Image: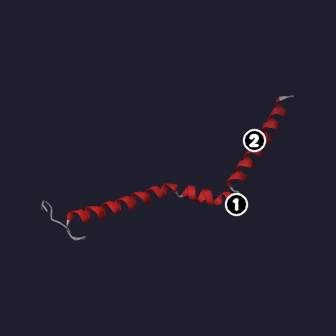
Amino acid sequence: MTIETLREIGLVLGSLAFLAICWWAFSPKRKKRFEEDANLPFADDEQQADKDASAAQKDESKSGEEPGTERKQGQDK
């Protein structure tokens, strides 16, 4: 077995591995999973926005004032 034969075997195995990965990545039955995974970074932002909105509503309800009223700086309850 010469070095050329080993190179040819390596080329064939590398090509097969590349084609297998491409087939796996672009398979239609995996499309939904990859779309969900692509939206993961945005899911954290949506959860944080929901938490901030609910916290703001709780703060307004605890203050005893009507929602939307603003206090001047330095004004106490």
Where in the figure is residue 8, as x and y percent of width and height?
82, 37
Q: Nearer the viewer, residue 61 or 52?
A: 61
Q: Residue at position x 66%, y 57% from top?
A: 30
Relative to the observer, which residue lies in front, 8 or 41? 41
Residue beneath the point at 77% across and 45% down: 16
Q: Is residue 67 above or below residue 31?
A: below
> Which residue is found at the position 34% from the left and 62% from the top?
54
Q: Is residue 2 above or below residue 43?
A: above
Residue at numbered disc 2? 14
Q: Amino acid at mark 2?
A: Gly
Q: Residues within 10 Å of mark 2 (few under 14, many from 20)?
A: few
Q: Which mark is residue 41?
A: none
Instruction: Find residue 4 and report its horizontal and vertical position in percent.
Output: 83, 33
Q: Is residue 8 left or right of residue 76?
A: right
State the SS at label 2: helix
Q: Which mark is residue 28?
A: 1
User: Could you tell me which quadrant the C terminus lies in?
Assistant: bottom left
User: Callout 1 environment at 10 Å: few (<14), some (14 to 19), or many (20+)?
Assistant: few
Front residue of this view, candidates 75 and 67: 67
